[in-house]
Amino acid sequence: MEKEIKLIFPFKLNDTFHSASLKTIIILKESTISFSLPFNLNLKIVNAELKKHSKINQTYFYVFTFDELVYAKEFMHQPQMFVMKESVYRNREELEDETNKFLDEYESTKKKRVKQVLIEHEDGFCEFVTEEF
């Protein structure tokens, strides 16, 4: 059934949140809804969890599952969703890989701190040795 959804963006203009309305077909089956949008957004719906987000041809397909059927029916009555600033759908392994790559690059390019240490030999001779840490 074609509905007008309200997208609420994560920034304010004149102390009010900016929103936009868009017509799309929403399919409800039990406590699961599915719809498509012409652009890729990171969306959040109250009391729902994203189950699938994929690109099909030129549109992006979203599938959300609600905690209870009541919440799905409330959403169908007044479709409203929040656009997130950053991706909350990232896979843990992808995030760990990206973090590890960043740390490896950082450690290879950062300046090594050098410290001079005074070492005294058994014969009483002293010398400064530089150590990196």
Image (cartoon, rainbow, N blue to C red):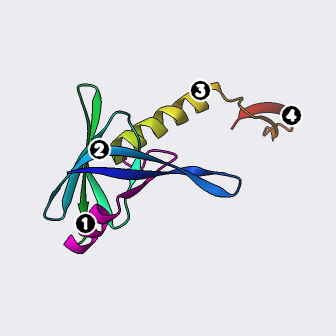
Q: Give the distance between the C-alpha atoms of the residues marked 3 and 4, in whole angstroms.
A: 36 Å
Upstream in sequence: badge 1 or badge 3: 1
Residue 21 position within the rendered picture, expressed as x and y whole percent measured from the top left: 43, 47
Q: Amino acid at mark 4?
A: Phe
> Which residue corresponds to mark 1?
72
Q: Amino acid at mark 2?
A: Thr
Element type at mark 2: strand
> Which residue corresponds to mark 3?
108
Magenta range: 69-90
Residue 104 position within the rendered picture, expressed as x and y whole percent measured from the top left: 52, 31
Q: Amino acid at mark 1?
A: Ala
Question: Which mark's residue is nearer the viewer, 1 or 3?
Answer: 1
Question: Which mark's residue is nearer the viewer, 1 or 2?
Answer: 2
Q: Give the distance between the C-alpha atoms of the residues marked 1 and 2, in whole angstroms.
A: 16 Å
> Which residue corresponds to mark 4?
125
Horizontal side, residue 105 vs residue 119: left or right = left
Q: Residue at x 77, y 31 (%)?
A: 130
> Which residue corresponds to mark 2?
24
Q: Give the distance between the C-alpha atoms of the residues marked 2 and 3, in whole angstroms.
A: 49 Å
